[in-house]
Amino acid sequence: MRVVVTGGAGYVGGFAAERLLELGHEVTVFDNLWRGHAAGVPKGADFIEVDLRDAEGVMRAVRKAAPEAVMHFAAATLVGESMGHPRSYFGVNVVGTHNLIFAMVEAGCSKFVFSSTAAVYGVPERIPILEDDPKKPINPYGQSKWIVEQMLPWHAEAYGLNYACMRYFNVAGGASHRGEDHDPETHLVPILLEAAAGKRDEFTIFGEDYNTFDGTNIRDYVEVHDLVEAHVLALDKLDKPLGAFNLGTKTGFSVKQVLEAARNLTDQPIPARVGPRRAGDPPVLVADSTRARTELGWNPVRSDLETMLNGAWEWLQNNPNGYRK
Ligand SMILES: NC(=O)c1ccc[n+]([C@@H]2O[C@H](COP(=O)([O-])OP(=O)(O)OC[C@H]3O[C@@H](n4cnc5c(N)ncnc54)[C@H](O)[C@@H]3O)[C@@H](O)[C@H]2O)c1
């Protein structure tokens, strides 16, 4: 298939583009390199530098790439930043996605896999979270993704757009040649490993007085190759709208568990201090992903702490400056 991967110069999109190429698909990456890296676009993929907010540019790019399917990873992704800059988040994530699906419909492309997020649920009413649980985003980031999710069924009905919304909880892991290179970095695993590598002085635990077994937040992690596999499985089934899938493992890890595992793996002390809680951080976010397992046949086999940390550590050790040489 000819597949457009938006955000393919970024972390998850780069892994997805690479996997699609391995499977024999023709891949075109759309990215404006705002937070991605030209060096992160896998060899063998075509690359079109385009900003999704530029409706005409997106239309031209879609016509040129003539995709049969689109995997849409490009987004503004930082919860904290979204609170201060909501217009950027609605601009990129809502307007940008609207431009993309508008161009897809015009070009007769009907398969769409969308990167969504656990942030659509806000503070969950029960754990583990199921797909049909209430959506009450508490930040513009989560709201922007939920707006897009709500647009999609109407496009299915009116234009025959077949879509899948993949709601990620936390993504982690890497490979020797590919990994997370965010600026700023806000994710736990790379931050811990940067501290282990001496690139940060210390690590801050945001609160240790939560109602969890060790007082720190518990989050559900999926290893990045496992995560991408769910998208590949969804792509195969997109001859009808599929709806939304939680991508998690139901097994959460606490901040202190991840910290200890990182200390063990790297054999470094990783100095940690306890800071105040962050606003809007629920104590536990864990997904029930039965739907992805039964309907897509998804089986996340690499999402244990050791595999995730190993991959991310391998990436950091081989590429101490990320994609910058
Ligand atoms: N990484 C996670 O833990 C996580 C968790 C939940 C959801 N997600 C979602 O997964 C997707 C990928 O996340 P990631 O961690 O790979 O992010 P990333 O920042 O590494 O990649 C996003 C890419 O999108 C590109 N982009 C941003 N704005 C653009 C625009 N206007 N036009 C074109 N390209 C643009 C960036 O340059 C970047 O290459 C996002 O949609 C994110 O919301 C990620």
Image (spheres, helix red, strand yellow):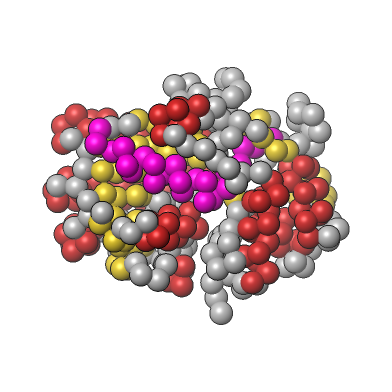
Quadrant of image for the C terminus: bottom right
Q: Is residue 86 magenta?
A: no
Which residue corresponds to the image point at 55% horizontal and 75% vertical from the top-left? 324
Which residue corresponds to the image point at 18% horizontal and 63% vertical from the top-left? 64
Q: Is residue 262 above or below residue 315?
A: above
Answer whether residue 278 is visible to the viewer in this image: yes
Tell me residue 187's x, y (percent): 62, 51
Quadrant of image for the N terminus: bottom left
Which residue corresponds to the image point at 37% horizontal and 56% vertical from the top-left? 23
Q: Residue furthest bottom?
A: 325
| 268, 16: nearer the viewer | 16
Q: Is residue 149 left or right of residue 86?
A: left
Tell me residue 90's x, y (percent): 38, 45
Which residue corresponds to the image point at 48% horizontal and 31% vertical from the top-left? 293
Res 281 quadrant in image: top right
In the image, the segment drawn in magenta is 218-240
| 294, 322: nearer the viewer | 294
Tell me residue 206's x, y (percent): 73, 43
Q: Is residue 232 magenta?
A: yes
Q: Is residue 177 above or below residue 97?
A: below
| 221, 324: nearer the viewer | 221
Q: Is residue 276 left or right of residue 224?
A: right
